[in-house]
Image (spheres, rainbow, N blue to C red):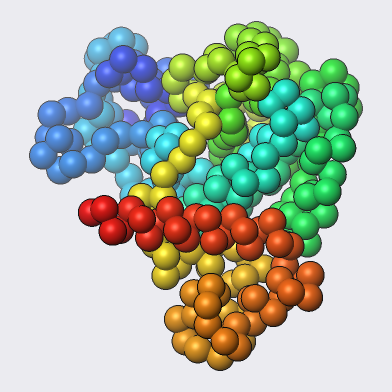
Amino acid sequence: MEKGRIIKALSGFYYVESEGRTVQCRARGNFRKKKITPLVGDIVGFEAENPTDGYILAVADRKSELFRPPIANIDQAILVFSAKEPDFSPLLLDKFLVHTEAAELESVICVSKADLGLEKADPYLSAYEKAGYRVIITSSETEGQVNELLPVLSGRLSVFAGQSGVGKSSILNALKPELKLETAAISKSLNRGKHTTRHVELIHMPDGGFVADTPGFSSLDFRHVETETLSAMYPEMAARINDCKFRGCTHLNEPGCAVKQAVKSGEIPAFRYQSYKQFYEEIANRKRRY
């Protein structure tokens, strides 16, 4: 049995890269019984008589995985949010960050389309940096700015994620021009982009490592996050949890709450606390429904 990594999944086929070649494989039926679905990024055991007729026989243990987009063994998430067109959304960025924190992924915030102006994004970026996130400003129009991403990507498996139309494919085209990934202008009426990436695929980067270009999406659910753990997904809140008066503090109505005090003093930005409260309510409503 040979070993390789799934670099693309499309129409029921898995494309496994092994020793410089790519083999088109199907998954054996016993995966359904085990309730295991091979994912892009998986290290797998396979057998193949020729390059288009292989079968995946085993999936190695994963060090990380995301459900949306479906990808395994990621080292870091590059969260791409445009400065404009569509407008920078701290609420949506916070939602992405909650999901990457829940998956125990390092996250890098990449602000795209800086050439259109940063006035909508600037008021929030220092808060994210203070919380411990790396922020990189890019413009696909300026090669030097985009190339700041190359050392961040080197030697790692990174997932590019973000709302449709923010310029993920444009950035990847600038990093590796031979890709010629499809791009599309955003809808002026809806202020959001069309889906130009239709499947998850790993792309080799010039300085080593892989990047996963993923289908764009504009919403996420909290299926794998609970109210009791939500505040731990906010680094600036997690650092103060043990200082709250009551164990299991929700940081909503309890007296002696260190998080609320930090919001009041400005140490935790109000917009971050507001997103926490909104997500808490979303998760609580989900639990009440089910």
Where in the figure is residue 202, as x and y percent of width and height? Answer: 52, 26
Vertical side of 102 occupied by 266: above or below:
below
Where in the figure is residue 178, as x and y percent of width and height? Answer: 68, 10
Asked whether 99 or 23 is in front, the reply is: 99
User: Residue at horizontal 56%, vertical 60%?
Assistant: 276
User: Residue at horizontal 50%, vertical 55%?
Assistant: 279
- Quadrant in the rendering for residue 170: top right
Where in the figure is residue 120, as x and y percent of width and height? Answer: 81, 38
User: Residue at horizontal 18%, vertical 41%?
Assistant: 35
User: Residue at horizontal 87%, vertical 29%?
Assistant: 117
Q: In the picture provided, is 260 more to the left or to the right than 68?
A: right
Asked whether 141 or 12 is in front, the reply is: 141
For the C terminus, the quadrant is bottom left
Residue lying at the far bottom in this picture: please name it.
245
Q: In the picture provided, is 47 more to the left or to the right than 127?
A: left
For the N terminus, the quadrant is top left
Where in the figure is residue 249, as x and y percent of width and height? Answer: 49, 80
Residue 21 in view, yes or no = no
Asked whether 264 or 104 is in front, the reply is: 264
Residue 51 in view, yes or no = yes
- Quadrant in the rendering for residue 265: bottom right
- Quadrant in the rendering for residue 113: top right
Q: In the picture provided, is 127 more to the left or to the right than 12?
A: right
Vertical side of 131 occupied by 212: above or below:
above
